[in-house]
Amino acid sequence: MSTLTMRLEDFASPAANPSPSTGLFTRLTRARETSANRQVAVYLATQSDERLGALGFDANAIASIRAGKLPIPA
């Protein structure tokens, strides 16, 4: 007679047990996006008004960039 035992959790599909790392992944993604937005804002702030205009920014968006706010496209 065998004394080997198996748990049901060992055979359950991963979809049946949601991963506890889902929240971690969301936080890491959000942190990376925030970092990227900062880098873009710094880059845009170093550009001239003429260059920003050539990139498609209007006067209001350029004013927002100069005020330290990154305009979010619609």
Image (spheres, rainbow, N blue to C red):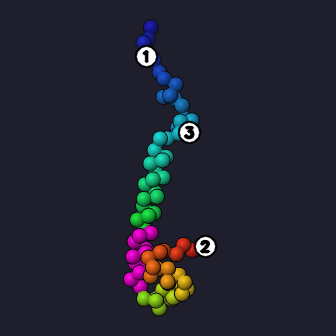
Q: Give the residue displayed 54% in from the left and 84% down from the top.
A: 60
Of callouts 2 and 1, the N-terminal one: 1
Secondary structure, mark 1, is loop
Residue 65 visible in the snapshot: yes
- Residue 1 in the image: x percent, y percent? 44, 8
Write down the residue under mark 1: 4
Q: Are marks 2 and 3 in contact (CB under 8 Å)?
A: no
Q: Give the residue displayed 53% in from the left and 39% down from the top.
A: 18
Q: Give the residue displayed 57% in from the left and 35% down from the top.
A: 16
Of callouts 3 and 1, the N-terminal one: 1
Write down the residue under mark 3: 15
Please name whichever residue, 65 or 40, is drawn nearer the observer in this view of the structure: 65
Secondary structure, mark 2, is loop
Q: Give the residue displayed 44% in from the left and 48% down from the top.
A: 24
- Residue 19 in the image: x percent, y percent? 49, 41
- The boundaries of the magenta stretch are 37-47
- Residue 55 in the image: x percent, y percent? 51, 85
Question: Which numbered disc, 2 or 3, marks the residue closer to the eye?
Answer: 2
Say if 19 sits above or below 70 in the image.
above
What's the residue type where badge 1 is placed? Leu
- Residue extending furthest bottom? 50
Secondary structure, mark 3, is loop
**Measured Cα–Cα span from mark 3 to mark 1:** 26 Å
Write down the residue under mark 2: 74
